[in-house]
Amino acid sequence: TGFSALPGGYCNTYYGEFRYIRNNGFLWSATEYNSDLIWLRALNYNNGSFDRDNISREVGLTVRCIKNHGLPIIQTSNVTEIMQTTAVSGGHISSDGGSSITTYGVCWSTNQNPTIDDDKTIDGSGTGSFTSNISGLTSNTAYFIRAYASNNNGTGYGNTISFSTQNDIINGTFTDLRDVN
């Protein structure tokens, strides 16, 4: 990602002590988990992982610095009309990041962070809202989907949404052995 940070741990304000210094870096997220907890991002010094977790609002975490590198800002639309092999989603592009949007759509995968290297739609260019008709899915399968928009600076992604396709057994017969119906 080109991002680096020092493993500064966090401050447990209840006990007044720092924990995980030199092992983990914990960064505030702008998203609330619920009224008592917030989402955080955790960088692990030993294995290079970058995880998402929740924690009490009463801990001291590193300030998260945000820099928009000229990427589009986009939000993923809810998934609707879910069938065995198709679904509908889309997105809303609120900023082109200072450079014209060259392509947008949605990407999906059975892995939690789909990218444009996975299956995707190509729905157009420009900003605003769009709808994507997704096909080629496998029935009775859990998927992760997110909208994307690309410009000359790179690709911006929306929030990830999970959904499951319907089972392919729609019609069939059933025999009630008790009443023989």
Image: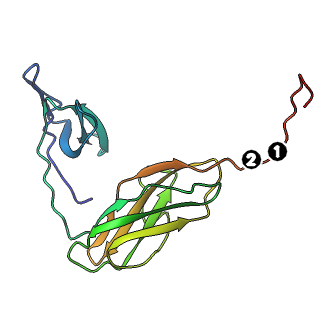
Q: Which residue occupies the foreground of this view, 181 or 62?
A: 181
- The percent position of residue 31, horizontal first and vertical second, equals 24, 45
Which quadrant of the figure has residue 114? bottom left
Q: Quadrant of the N terminus?
A: bottom left
Task: Say the numbered circle drawn on residue 169.
Answer: 2
Would you place residue 60 above or below residue 73 in this image?
above
Identity of the amino acid at label 1? Gly
Q: Residue at x 67, y 47 (%)?
A: 167
Q: Residue at x 31, y 42 (%)?
A: 51
Q: Is residue 90 visible?
A: yes
* Residue 64 relative to residue 162: left or right: left
- The percent position of residue 150, horizontal first and vertical second, equals 34, 73
Farthest right residue in view: 180
- The percent position of residue 146, horizontal first and vertical second, equals 41, 58
Q: Residue at x 65, y 52 (%)?
A: 139
Identity of the amino acid at label 2? Ile
* Residue 18 relative to residue 71: left or right: left
- The percent position of residue 2, horizontal first and vertical second, equals 23, 60
Disc 1/disc 2 C-alpha distance (Å): 7 Å
* Colouring: rainbow
**On the image, numbered disc 1 is attached to which residue?**
172
Q: Are marks 1 and 2 in contact (CB under 8 Å)?
A: yes
Which quadrant of the figure has residue 176? top right
SS at circle 1 = loop
SS at circle 2 = loop
Q: Which residue occupies the foreground of this view, 9 or 36?
A: 36
Q: Which residue occupies the foreground of this view, 20 or 112?
A: 112
Farthest left residue in view: 16
